[in-house]
Image (cartoon, rainbow, N blue to C red):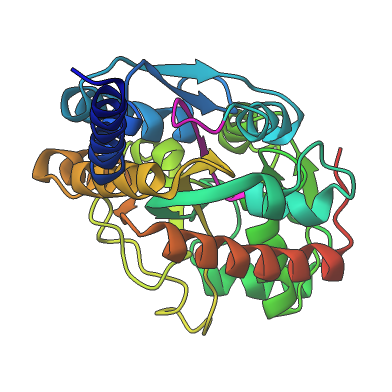
Amino acid sequence: MPQHRLTRRAFNLTAGAAAVTLASPSLAQPAWPSKPIRIVVPYTPGGFTDQMARLVQPGLQARLGQPVVIDNKPGANSQIGVDAVAKAPPDGSTFGVVIAAYAANTTLYPKLPYDPAKDLVGVSLMGVSPLLAAVNNDAPFKTAKELIDYARANPGKISFGSSGNGSAAHLTTELWKALTGTYMIHIPYRGAVPALTDLLGGQIQLFFDAPTGLINQGKAGKVRLIGVAGDKRLPAVPEVPTFIEQGFAGFTGSTWAGMLAPRGTPREIVKRMSEEVARIIQLPETRAKLDAMGTFPAGSTPEEFDAFIAAETRKWGDVIRRAGVKAD
């Protein structure tokens, strides 16, 4: 065969192969996921954030066909774990689950090791958990109104606990103080468990916290649940009214859980993960578990979650600046 015909044939074969490659993106890059997925939880095992991550873990493994590993990286009010996500390769192998403290940290810490706007993107809002307010059984008030009347008549006589400076519990109580014009003493703890212990013992009189930590204590009669800081009652404790129902218009405060990814993660991967998380969150068996936790299921698009984070950052930033809250 003449040389020029061989050359032309080789050119045609090469061009044809290139056309197939361009027409078939799946041949140009491996399908996702092609390796195990890591979900970083910036808190210790057993807490609300960890529970939410483990709630979707089995479903993600089944649907994505790869192991999904929970990696707990606590410390610095979630900064260590979030920084690990921000600096991870944006290849769809690393995600993170965060809570309301993530939005508050933007104002609390002027020098974060990561830039929330530049280093991370939202994947999906997973669930919203309005805080419950509990008071010690021996406290001289039994309702939200009685508590406020007592606080106004006795400035500084009520101590309230939180799981730490800048936590959702702390900021929600500061918001309530501003709304009601009261002065109460803040006692920060290193976690919700010691705060609850002191509430039971009477060292503090008031504690706002995620429902997971208070529902069983309230049902057992060990504390008195006086209100839900949301716009509707919790299915797990339907007898407890919202603060809005009790005359505190517009008062809401919650923790929430949502998934993030390193910025630069391919958009189709972020979208796929968002869809899978939302699908798992809305399953009847998942919703039943969330109900028991006092958490309303969400499941959002990445764009919706980004907008939600921006709104939360503004809301809690205003509270932090007005109350003069400082990080530990």
Which residue is rendered at x = 55% and y = 75% of the image? Answer: 251
Residue 44 horizontal/vertical position (percent): 56, 20
- Asked where in the image residue 281 lies, by quadrant, the reply is top left
Question: Which quadrant of the structure image shows residue 130?
Answer: bottom left
Q: Nearer the viewer, residue 38 or 226?
A: 38
Say whether residue 227 is visible.
Answer: no
Residue 80 pos. (x, y %): 71, 27
**Can residue 280 be found in the magenta stretch?**
no
Check the image and report above or below for 298 versus 202: below
Q: Check the picture and name the quadrant holding the N terminus.
A: top left
Q: Which residues are magenta?
A: 90-101
Relative to 123, 318 lies left or right: right
**Residue at left offset 51%, top offset 46%:** 137
User: Outermost residue, left direction?
Assistant: 284
- At x 52%, y 85%, the residue is 249
Looking at the image, can residue 315 be seen?
A: yes
Which one is nearer the viewer's eye here, 279 or 241? Answer: 279
Q: Tell me residue 278's x, y (percent).
A: 26, 49
